[in-house]
Image: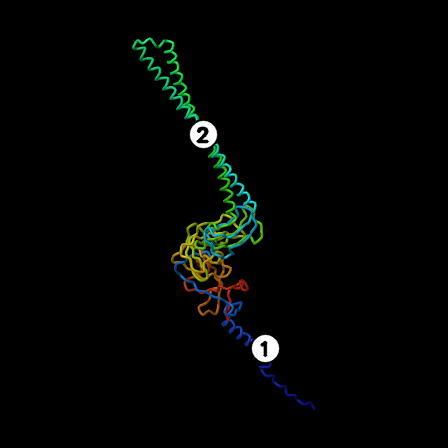
Amino acid sequence: MDIAREVATQPVWKKYWYVFPVIILLVAVYLLKNAFGNASYIIEKKDVLTAQVEQGTFRVNVKATGVLKPLNIRWVSSQVAGKVEQVHVKAGAYVEQGQVLMQLSNPELHRELEKARWELAANKAESNAAYVALESQLVDLENAVIAAKFNYQSAKLKLDAETALIEQGNATVSALDYQKSQLAVEQQQQYWLAQQQKVAKMKTNMAATQLAQKARLGLVENNVQRMQEQVAALQVRASTSGVVQQVSLELGERAHIGDSVALVADQQVLYAKLQVQEVRVRDIIIGQPVTIDTRTSELQGEVSRIDPAVKAGMVEVDVKLTSQLPPEARPELAVDGFIAISNIEDALYVKRPMYAPRYSNIGLFKLSKDKQFASKTQVTLGQSSVNKIQIVSGLTLGDEIIISDTSDWQEHQEIMIN
């Protein structure tokens, strides 16, 4: 006999078990959708830096690094050759103008000076002897003039007496004797004039000889003076007051003419030499105000020179300092310079994001109001300063953006900040 089986009814939940996971998945997707929005990337809050858009006067500055340099700097060089016998100063010492920096020795110069002095003394003696001889000749000539004068006067007196006798009709004087007396007077007069001319010529000759001797003596004296200066130059002296920056020669070394001995700089007058990037130097002009930061103090100055040459992508810019130097200011002190390019009134600006070149269109991540999300926004940038950049369009006052490196998620349009 057949026995009827009872068919067990399968529960609905077992029959449709797959419905529940699907429902759970849909709910999870819904919740995740609400939680993550359209974000396709998640970042940690601690890994990002943000900045808020501000509005006001935007000061455009160019930052540059550099050092302070002395404006008045002098290389002290050796005027003579010699061996370094003594070094009186070291680098860092303050020296006054004319102070001895180094002592050189050169026996040959001393011998040459002694020889020049003997030559000068001999020349003076010879000149004096020659002049005395000429004076003696002049005295003889002057005596001859006096004698000729007396002879003329004697002949003239005789002629005058004979003339008086003849006029009285006295026949004791013959005509021949009278003519001889007249001739004698004329001869004595001519002789007297000749002697006077000799004296004048001798005086002219003495003056010319004295002038020539003086010139020769001056030449020898100049030689002595030159040798004395060379011997004095064995003491190398500072040409200006200041601080010794460098001493080029050491004890026992040989110095040649023109060799650099020491570098002396005036620390009271300094200027700043800045290194500016080539791409930014086009905005710089002579006279622009500059703030120099010594890490302790701030100095004011202005651009005084722009080097026309470019070296390794940098351009040298000299800054004349207009404020009083602080105590820490000294040559070669490392400083930062902030060159004021321009001021833009009522401008939107923000702290400069990474990889944000000026005058460009880039995508920046703007935070939502709850700061849980950041969406990429196209922003037009304008002029840039040291650490800030102008916003031309794309952002408004109070917007907050990510300024740290966003290269890892640049391909995403929206991210979540966890």
Please give left or right for residue 99 compared with residue 82 in the image. Answer: left
The quarter holding residue 299 reads bottom left
Q: Amino acid at mark 2?
A: Ser
Q: Is residue 64 visible?
A: no
Residue for badge 2: 136
Quadrant placement of the N terminus: bottom right
SS of the residue under disc 2: helix
Task: Please identify the residue farthest to the bottom as the structure is shown.
Answer: 1
Where is mark 1, residue-wise?
Answer: 18
Type of amino acid under label 1: Tyr
213 w.r.t. 330: above or below: above
Q: Crowding at label 2, few (<14), some or many (≥20) Cα neighbours within 10 Å?
A: few
Q: Residues within 10 Å of mark 1 (few under 14, many from 20)?
A: few
With respect to residue 344, does 121 lie above or below?
Answer: above
In front here: 66 or 309?
66
Q: Residue at x 67, y 90 (%)?
A: 3
Q: x, y (%) of residue 20?
A: 56, 78
Name which residue lies at 46% across and 62% down.
295
Could you tell me residue 159's position as x and y percent? 35, 15
Task: Look at the numbered disc 1 and give the secondary structure of its residue.
Answer: loop
Badge number at residue 123: none
- Camera-side residue of 342 and 184: 184
Does the rendering let one see residue 173?
Answer: yes
**Which is nearer the eye, 275 or 89?**
89
Where is residue 178 drawn, in percent x and y? 36, 11
Task: Look at the picture and state if 267 lies above or below 2.
Answer: above
